[in-house]
Amino acid sequence: MGAIDQVGAKNVVLGGLSQGCAAALIALLTWGGEPIAAGCGMCEWLPFRMPIEDIASSDSFEDNKDGVDDDLFDVSGERAERDAPTQAIAFLCEEIELAAKEPSLSFQRIPIFLGHAVEDEKVPIGLGCEAVSCLKQIRASVEWREYESLGHWYSGTMLSQLVDTLRNMAGWGDTQRASYDLDTESVTSDMEDVVI
């Protein structure tokens, strides 16, 4: 990730809208490097949500106290040694054919802001709620907001709350200010070393 080399991980935010958010969430969950400043998304959904939730909530992966691995096809014994979030991320990495390596839980140290329009006709808000529930189940730090009277898009209010929340999450505080023009829904910033 070139942006991290240029400005440092604590100045990088990864996010997207709709399908872009889905891709950003998968990238955050499989990120193995130093935690970045934050993740964000609008009109989100989470690919592979159901199997991730199944693995994360499975008693066979939580506190496997008897040491018996219920997966007859796992000859390595790794599943018995991994906690539920690690096993869920290992599944995800395997599904998307990421190079075989030990899964990282860096995403648990990356705060995530997600906003969804209540009247979204393309990605129903229920998919966003399910994504948030799944992310919290694997111990991601997620702030969720719903926006009334809005379809599959963003608003000036959503963008201003997103930027304010990101500033707080990333610890940028008052040293860097963002200005909002809510009439044109544009966001400008004097955060020169921040990649958004």
Image: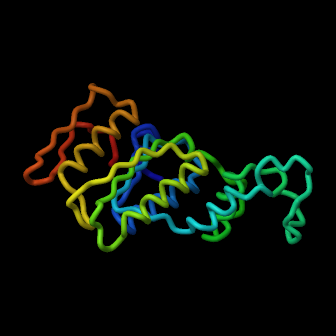
At horizontal 33% and vertical 41% (from top left) the residue drawn is: 194
Residue nearest the observer in this picture, 172 or 66: 66
Between 64 and 126, the one lying in front of the other is 126
Residue 193 horizontal side relative to residue 28, left or right: left
Q: Position of residue 188 (x, y in %)?
A: 18, 44
Residue 12 appears in which quarter of the rendering?
A: top left
**In which quadrant of the rendered view does residue 75 lie?**
bottom right
**Residue plotted at (33% across, 39% down):** 165
Q: Is residue 192 left or right of residue 38?
A: left
x, y percent for residue 53: 62, 60
Image color mode: rainbow
User: 4 or 103, which is in the foreground?
Assistant: 103
Q: Residue at x 66, y 63 (%)?
A: 54
Judge from the rendering whether residue 78 lies leftward or rightward of residue 153; answer left or right. Answer: right
Residue at image location 34% in from the left, 49% down from the top: 145
The image position of residue 39, as x and y in percent, is: 43, 49
**Given the current orientation, which residue lies at the most extreme left position?**
183
